[in-house]
Image (tube, helix red, strand yellow):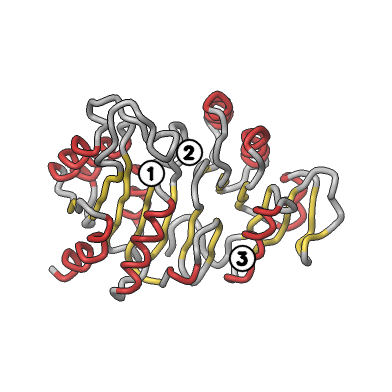
Amino acid sequence: MSVLVDKNTRVVTQGITGKTGAFHTRACKEYGTQMVAGVTPGKGGQDFEGIPLFDTVHQAKKETGANVSIIYVPPPFAADAIMEAVDADLDLVICITEGIPVLDMLKVATFMQGRRTRLIGPNCPGIITPGQAKIGIMPGFIHKPGRIGVVSRSGTLTYEAVFQLSALGMGQSTCIGIGGDPLNGTNFIDCLKLFNEDKDTDAVVMIGEIGGSAEVDAAQWVKENMKKPVVSFIAGATAPPGRRMGHAGAIISGGDDTAEAKFTALSAAGIHVVRSPHEIGAKMQEVMSK
């Protein structure tokens, strides 16, 4: 069993003919992911390095059996791209695009109500089940198949955690970058539920940031429901109140959304907290040895 994506996943790329979409579609295909279609309006009937192009996601799904979309569409058009993929009733939509206006994402959230499609992102690195499917911009070579789940708001810190885990002989079941925007699709609790139910995941790394209440909410859920150990780090401990640090969602008002408040909540929930990202791998090794 894997979480959300596996070797049978069939992917359509929205924005495949742009530089970013082309580069990462090529990399995902080289990893072994089934990149079965691309969507660029006006280019239907053409192909990108053997991958057929379609004008709409509906057409791509009908002709190729695609069940997942990855989006590299520029910010002004990305929300429409998400809604088009959701309207096509795909299983999963992954939006890499950074800089989508919050108002646009409010429209997306309203549009998605009552629909079964899951959204990961926006402003995220994507998702990978090592050895099976890589759908996103993460460096595939640092990931190794294994039994540690990873969920993170930060793409860069995801790579850091994965590199440490792999170097210590701890492969990953699935790694999910949920993105750092104020409004996103899949959240920490969604991912923790999936990992908690996955028979091939033994423990989870959760990497959060300052801003918002997602980590505190997740801590409470872990305390009440999680059957597997969780190691966690919160980025932004030195950020001053009111200043945005990195991601659009990483801004603190000085209350319960500070790093210190989140560290306290995580520890109270029985989560294994580290104060430096360099300690993630070693802490997981320590936890798994007990």
Q: Is residue 276 left or right of residue 117?
A: left
Residue at 21% x, 68% y is 285
Kindly indicate whether the residue at mark 3 contacts the one at mark 2 (C-beta within 8 angstroms): no
Q: Pick whichever of labels 2 and 3 is earlier in the sequence.
A: 3
Amino acid beneath label 1 = Asp
- Element under disc 3: helix
Residue at 27% x, 35% y is 217
Amino acid beneath label 2 = Gly
Residue 12: x %, y % from top left: 67, 54
Q: Nearer the viewer, mark 2 or mark 3?
A: 3
Residue 24: x %, y % from top left: 62, 59
Amino acid beneath label 3 = Ala
Q: Name the residue under label 1.
A: 190
- Element under disc 2: loop
Q: Pick whichever of labels 1 and 3 is earlier in the sequence.
A: 3
Q: Mark 2 points at which residue?
A: 185
Q: How crowded is mark 3: few (under 14 residues within 10 Å), some or many (20 or more)?
A: some
- Which disc is residue 27 wearing? 3
The quadrant the N terminus occupies is: bottom left
In the image shown, does 223 or 143 lie closer to the viewer?
143
In the image shown, does 253 or 197 lie closer to the viewer?
253
Q: How crowded is mark 2: few (under 14 residues within 10 Å), some or many (20 or more)?
A: many
Residue 11: x %, y % from top left: 64, 57
